[in-house]
Amino acid sequence: MTHWGPVVARNGDLTVIDCIHCGWAHLYPLPDEEKVKAFYENDGQYTDDSWFEKELKERRKGFWEAYYESQAKLLYTPHSTIIDWGCGAGFFLHWWRRGNKSLWARGVEPSKRAREFYPKIHPSPISCSAPIFSSEKNVPVFPQQNHRISLVLEHLVDPLGFMKMVGKRGESKVLIVVPNEITNPLQKKVGGNWWVQKHHINYFTPQGLRRLLWLAGFEVTYETATFPMELFILLLGADYRNNDELGRKCHEFRLKFERRLGRAAFALYHLLYQRFGWGRELVFVAEKGRQNNE
């Protein structure tokens, strides 16, 4: 397979091209797929349990309730099963299970550390297992499956192959969250290519994500975005890049904002995305279309 296209960003020795062959931007050259699999399956992104413990504290304060509720409303279909791909320690699954006890739900997560952390904090019957890279062999297929694919596609060497695999699992609705890159107006105003990282392989614009889903046989039915984090830098001078302590404060402000405003916060994000293209991450809903790209 030949990947080619104009260079859209460089950061150190990393190069991102707007690939004509694929239809979305990605690192060039692409990393070795086996090395990527090994990185995530060997807990490369989680050196200890601190990330899970931080999110557990945030959940106990109710910070994630509004965020999870907004996604659940987009994803819910009566009598459907739920698969949360790249579920981490299973926080969304646990939240989902509380309000939808009759619906089967399962998480798929490559990190052994994350899978082992899950039962320590959630004594519930939800299964949270199976490496994402061998997922089609480990996750049962049901007639109606809905899929949450949050912050996953940017890490995969072959996101199209993954989405085609999801589409083969029968009638389905997918909720996808990926970073909003390259054409994000606020990102452009901040400047620099700080957003190019070696573990982010793909860099999606709205057009690029639509292209990927179309090729995989899905029809996009809804588009929105998340909190426009770059406003902290542009309006307040709070440059959280390479500043973990400030980044945590900005992150917590956003969560408190969503907890206080509830549904109104996500209505505002939708308006800002539709009018200006703002939002740190893209949130797309798509359903299995009539195309057959197998």
Image: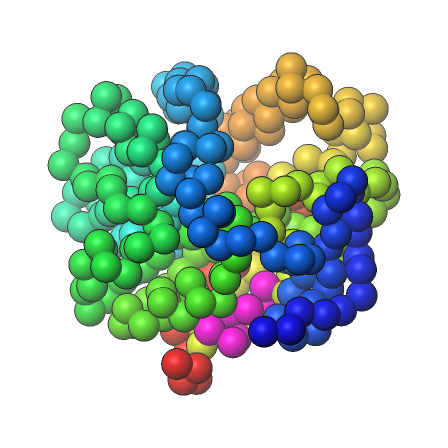
- Depth check, front residue: 224 or 267: 224
Give the residues drawn in magenta, as a range.
209-216
Residue 160 as seen in the image, left or right of residue 237: left
Q: Position of residue 156 (x, y in %)?
A: 50, 54
Whether residue 105 is visible:
yes
Q: Nearer the viewer, residue 122 or 5?
A: 5
The residue shown at (44%, 56%) is: 175
Q: Residue 260 appears at what percent x and percent y?
A: 53, 27
Residue 69: percent from left, percent from top: 40, 41
Q: Residue at x 20, y 63 (%)?
A: 141
Up-down relation of residue 115 to residue 102 (above or below): above
Q: Residue at x 83, y 33 (%)?
A: 234
Task: Specify the quadrant of the image occupied by residue 95.
Answer: top left
Q: Is residue 210 magenta?
A: yes
**Does residue 196 appear left or right of residue 111 in this picture?**
right
Q: How is the image coloured?
A: rainbow
Compare residues 256 and 201 and report the one nearer the observer. Answer: 201
Q: How far across and how far down the image is residue 163, in percent?
A: 43, 65
